[in-house]
Amino acid sequence: MKTILVAEDDDDDFFFTARSLRKVCAAQVNRVESGREAIDYLAAQGSYGDRAAFPFPDLMFLDLKMGEVDGHAVIAWIRGHLSPGQLPLYVLTGSGELRDRALVATAGVARGYLVKPLAQHNLPGILSAVAVRPTVTSL
Amino acid sequence: MVAHQTGGDLVLVKAPIGADATNIQNVLRGGGIPVRICSSDLDIREGLEECGALVLTEEALTVSLNKLLLSGFEVQPAWSDIPIVLIGSGGISNSGASAAAKLKGPRRTITLLERPLRATTLMATMHTVLSARRRQYEIRALLSERDLLLSTLESRVQERTADLRRMVEEMEAFSYSVSHDLRSPLRSLEGYARALQEDYADDLPEGAKVYIEKIARAAARMDNLTQDVLAYTRATQCEMETGPVELSRVVAEVIEQYPAIASAAGCIHIQEPLGRVIGHVPSLIQCFSNLLGNALKFVPEGRAPIIRIYSEKKGRCLRVTVKDNGIGIDPAQHVRIFGMFERAAKKQFSGTGIGLAIVKKAVERMGGAVGVISELGTGAEFWVELIAASEDSMGLPTSAQLNGSSSRGITPENGARWSVAAP
């Protein structure tokens, strides 16, 4: 089964994202609640050391505004530690702030910049591009 | 003796022959003027800065003293012009005059007295030159006061600038926080209402469904209001660095960024190229998204929207028009609709009443103007005039420019190229 990682500190927002994903695919959705945890998960370190229990994600949604280590810091870490294209990453954030958009675009790591809530019509394209088979083919 | 720091009446005297120096000193002291007799050139050099005047006899004016005086005068501050009283030996040789001539130069006030010299003449002369010197001290005081004012002014300007910068930063932090945090509970509110409708539709009586729909709509409306108020604040307060902007690119960006506009891209016809203006890209994106959003929204039921975007040169400005085939606006409302929270349309068209206020504010801050041409029922032409940027870097001229035809016409037949916006 494919694994989707959602980095999201807000419980409600995670509920909506997971709900949207569950509706269109059967992937395993794992959650991390901070930038620090996201980096630990991706690096398989700390409490995420077990790769069998926490597989490297096939797709990741990343919130930007999270506590002390935010989404931008996670993007910087990915840039420095993963090879380009290794992790299909989408920013999923609360606002379309130009400053955030510009920072994400400059880093050049994310495949897309999405504003919450995750729109259902966006998902099939995103999922098929990373070979997560959608349960619904057309919407 | 007087405190010389602030400039006093101290008179330096150099008169090397006989009792000359003592005699001069006696006369001046008798008149209440402080005196210092200088026996060497060094004494003069040391006293020059603090003295009110110099009294020299012709015999004192040696080559070395002459040199010292010339260089000393050159380094005087701007306000200073030390008066010299030169006492010539008199007689028919007129050697005093030639000695005075040797000292001449810019900013040098020399008074020549000839022997035999009366005490009253010397005193009257000294009063005159010292009073002139006192005026110089007054000028010095004014100058230093001015310098003090200028230096505090500069620090005050710096302080104010820092304050302003801090305010802008706080403002930006605030709006960032609003756009993230204030909207989050609204999103949840709408999200759970929608989830309730979708997941428990079968268990809900019809009345409950209506209420839930109202909750979802109210949350969405509040979210729109939040975003619009934020956009208005930004249009009013953000730092607006303007530069040359390709308008076609702005419109393409709007269509790409706004899903609601992208889905209607097929009915947006753009006369390419729209040209270049001096503007601020984020503000222009905001303006055109609002204008296009309105053009798509205010269409009577059952009519397919047709929107045209074209530009024309107006003096040093470029006027860009967004023309729709919507419900139109009563001319009596044309001014009102650009105000905050003002709406002309009926309730069936939802909106916050802030969109056009944002456009007006942003365009005016870019040095431009906005307006509308419309009648009720005939569609509307919203225009934005901005300062045109030079065409130099626009690349090849368009066919319209080569043919010499103006870009006023909006039909494809007259050489202008039309494109249908791609989603």
Image: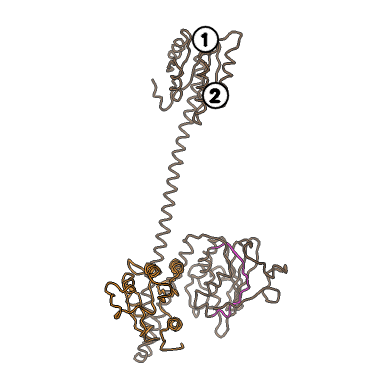
Chain colours: A orange, B brown
Q: Is residue A101 visible?
A: yes
Q: Per the image, is B317 magenta?
A: no
Q: Earlier in the sequence, mark 1 or mark 2?
A: 2
Query: Are the two marked residues, 1 and 2, in contact with CB atoms closer than 8 angstroms?
Result: no
- A64 or B193: nearer the eye? A64
* Residue at image location 43% in from the left, 58% down from the top: B168
Tell me the number on the disc at residue B118: 1
Tell me the number on the disc at residue B385: none
Marked residue chain, label 2: B
Local crowd size for mark 2, using a 10 Å CA cut-off: few (<14), some (14–19), many (≥20): some
Please tell me whether mark 1 sits on a helix, a strand or a loop: loop
Q: Report the Cα–Cα distance between label 1 and label 2.
A: 25 Å
* Depicted A63 relative to depicted B94: above or below: below
Q: Amino acid at mark 2?
A: Arg
Q: Amino acid at mark 1?
A: Arg
Magenta range: B264-279
- Residue bearing mark 2: B108
Q: Is residue B376 visible?
A: no
* Residue at image location 45% in from the left, 36% down from the top: B145
